[in-house]
Amino acid sequence: MKLDIPIDVHAPSDKLKQEPWPNSFLIVDSNGQKRDLSERGLSKREIPGKALSRDVPLERDLVERQVSGSWAVYCVDCHAKGHLNIAGKAEWNAAEGLKTLEASMKGGLEVQVAIGLVAEVELKKTMEQEIARLTIPGFAIPKIIE
């Protein structure tokens, strides 16, 4: 007795996407949500031309960093194909019953797994610093420019 079993395992065609890769299957993602890693605070920097010590103040700038990102992991053209051959032989007779029983299996399997990662990171940095303050001698608007 012989039995040949074909093996063909792949993602369902209604779940396959053609973007960002042909025949890709989405495994997991950030659900389109961007994770916000923003921070806002003061950065310190040394005043040019002055040695750094506890007596020398550091200038402080207002810095705002906005970082966000999203990600997705795909299985690209993943599949398993192959075959399994099963063969067997049995000998028996009515007087002695089962005399011999033999079975053999042969097969081959090709598995392809390719992982694709799509990541998007956005970084925005805003910095505010006063560059100069100028006054015009003799010109004043009370409580606005003095």
Image (cartoon, rainbow, N blue to C red):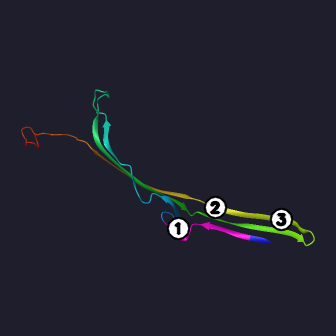
- Is 27 left or right of 96, judged from the image as shown? left
Q: Residues within 10 Å of mark 2 (few under 14, many from 20)?
A: few
Magenta stretch encompasses residue 129: no
Q: Are marks 1 and 2 in contact (CB under 8 Å)?
A: no
Tell me the distance, in whole angstroms, between the alpha carbons under discs 3 and 1. Answer: 43 Å
The residue type indicated by label 2 comes to Val
Q: Which residues are magenta?
A: 4-18
Which quadrant of the rendered structure holds the C terminus? top left
Residue 37 rendering spot, x and y as whole percentages: 38, 49
- Is 137 left or right of 101, judged from the image as shown? left
Tell me the distance, in whole angstroms, between the alpha carbons under discs 2 and 3. Answer: 30 Å
Q: Is residue 128 above or below residue 90?
A: above
Instruction: Kindly state the secondary structure of the residue where label 1 is placed.
Output: strand
Instruction: Give whichever of 80, 22 is nearer the camera.
Output: 80
Residue at image point 64% right, 68% down? 8
Instruction: Kindly state the secondary structure of the residue where label 3 is placed.
Output: strand
Residue 107 rendering spot, x and y as whole percentages: 73, 64
Disc number placed over residue 111 in the picture, else none: 2
Residue 3, by quadrant, is: bottom right
Residue sitting farthest toward the right: 95
Q: Residues within 10 Å of mark 3 (few under 14, many from 20)?
A: few
**Residue 94 appearing in the image:** yes
Residue sitting farthest toward the left: 138
Residue at image point 31% right, 37% down? 44
Residue tagged 1: 16
Disc number placed over residue 102 in the picture, else none: 3
Question: Which one is earlier in the sequence, the residue at label 1 or at label 2?
Answer: 1
**Residue 121 appearing in the image:** no
